[in-house]
Amino acid sequence: MTSNKGAAKYRGRRITLLGIMIVVAGGLVWRAVDLQILHKEFLQGQGDARHLRVVSIPAHRGMITDRHGEPLAISTPVDSIWANPQDLLAARGEWKQLAKALGVDRAWLKERLERNAAREFVYLKRHVQPELAEQVMALGIPGVSTQREYRRYYPAGEVAGHLLGFTNVDDAGQEGLELSFEQLLHGTPGSMRVVKDRLGRIVETVERINEPVPGRDLALSIDRRIQYIAYRELKAAVQANRAKSGSAVVLDVNTGEVLAMVNQPAFNPNNRESLRGDHYRNRAVTDLFEPGSTVKPFTVATALESGQYQPGTLIDTTPGTLRVGPNTIRDVHNYGLIDVTTLIAKSSNVGSGKLALALPPEQLWRKFAAVGLGAPSGGNVPGEALGSLPDYHRWYPIDRVTFSFGYGLSASTLQLARAYAALANGGVLKPVSLVPLTQAPAGERVMGGQVARQVVAMLEAATGDKGTGGAARVPGYRVAGKTGTVRKSAQGGYAEDSYLSLFAGLVPASDPRLAMVVMINDPRGDQFYGGAVAAPVFSRVMSGALRLLDVAPDDLPAFKAQTVAQAGAL
Ligand code: 59J
């Protein structure tokens, strides 16, 4: 009975347990069916929504090179480290280790996370070496991720900074050619769908939606070697003369290609923290100044074309001053009776004024406009300032006179170089170009070929023994060029002790290939004449450039004499 009773009790318990197990198992099966079959799509969607992301794939920015393919700007891959503040805020214990790896303060990290607590993305450190990014990721801290980006690197540093400009931290052009060629260089970012894990790391690429389209490369007309020599010599001269700033431009006179364009003070585009407007401005195109005596060759060209003057025509500059109404203009010396060539060689203001008074004002104005003063240089140069020519209808005689030697108008270093290139190639004005050309543009004839050659011959006299520009000479080559020393306009007139020192020239004078203008602003040393401050820069840069370009010397006897003299001195 007892056993019967016990057995019955046991059976009852077994049935109860079995029943419970069946119900539980059935529940599980049902749950599985429910999750995996009935609600599969909904749940998969919810899960994916938490882990599937579309991320952008940065496009590689095009390279900028010089005319020979030497790199001037290249984008190199770097990593940026970012966090999901919500996840990282929860991992307080890891902050110290993370801050140390990143080289930042823990307090800074805390502040940054708390300030961005509502966001899902905040950069912790941008543009780090891939090795550092790997080390940080190896710590496995929740909410910390890396992202591939590109950083712009400028191998020439300061040397080409003003021309290239720079990009921002997202590798988008901000200044200079980086900005003006943004469309071509920047490419189009792609995108891909990825699965991220609990820590926000990409664990699987589901699909690439759009492939990134890399930017195109851009070759410049610049010759990196000439650019470097110009940079070095301008910098040395600005320093030696304690000048405020300076610019220099070298043009190929047959094509209008810019071979070098440099400025001081310079800046290093690799160093984004040090960017200052007055340092990164491309002064050669943005800064305007009164060109002073460097425009006298165009006054003389107008006089020769009028038929009233020949290179040998005599002009009386006695007594070294010229009264025009209530005003008087002056030369630094009384040159007496001189011909037109000597007017250029000595840089006589009085001589120039007399030519101006003998010419219709409109003709003079038209010639200056024809050689490109006051007009765009044609090369889509970023930031270019146009300069200005005054309206000749309102001129008093004194205005004609001072205009003829470069006052009352403004121009840039680039414009002046372009005008000299027109003299150099026999009177044809070409647009300047910042990209290499396969064919020289036809240009526009702006003065007779004969007149242009006569003016170049006068400019050669200006670098001769009787001229103001002897310091511009280059051993082995004939040099044509003009000095200028311009008192800077100041409140109520012209400053007493503040100057621009200029030199504009062409080489080789027998068949010019290169034009160069050197402008040095406000030299504060012992010297301030263009002939002493700017001309030597021209000499050194052209000496290097002619050699680099393998231009045949056109003045071998002088070259030999000098080499012999040097050999004798040894
Ligand atoms: C000069 C001027 C100012 C403007 C004069 C330079 C005028 C003038 C009014 C005095 C220094 C100076 C409109 S000089 O460029 O004549 O380059 O090697 O600034 O004449 O009328 O103490 N250049 N420069 N003139 N103004 N207004 C000569 C000359 C030039 C030289 C030297 C000596 C001036 C040979 C300048 C050079 O050719």
Image: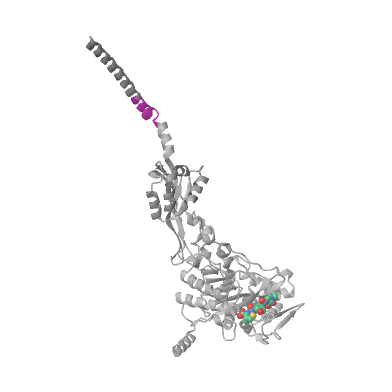
Q: Nearer the viewer, residue 329 or 352?
A: 329
Residue 501 percent coordinates (x, y): 60, 75
Which region is colored magenta? Answer: 28-40
Task: Indicate which quadrant contains ligand 1.
Answer: bottom right
Image vertical order of residue 491 relative to residue 93, above or below: below
Image vertical order of residue 194 relative to residue 35, above or below: below
Image vertical order of residue 309 relative to residue 66, above or below: below
In the rendered image, the quadrant that contains the C terminus is bottom left
Residue 223 percent coordinates (x, y): 47, 69
Residue 4 percent coordinates (x, y): 23, 11
Please say whether residue 518 is visible from this viewpoint.
Answer: yes
Rendered residue at 50%/66% (across/down): 158
Where, by quadrant of the figure, is residue 328 drawn? bottom right
Q: Nearer the viewer, residue 172 or 81?
A: 81
Where, by quadrant of the figure, is residue 408 drawn? bottom right
80 with respect to 403 (left or right): left
Image vertical order of residue 161 relative to residue 517, above or below: above
170 with respect to 359 (left or right): left
Rendered residue at 49%/47% (across/down): 110
Q: Residue furthest bottom?
A: 568
Q: Nearer the viewer, residue 161 or 319?
A: 161
Please say whether residue 188 is visible from this viewpoint.
Answer: no
> Most prominent secondary structure in the magenta stretch?
helix
Residue 81 percent coordinates (x, y): 44, 50
Q: Residue furthest front?
A: 2
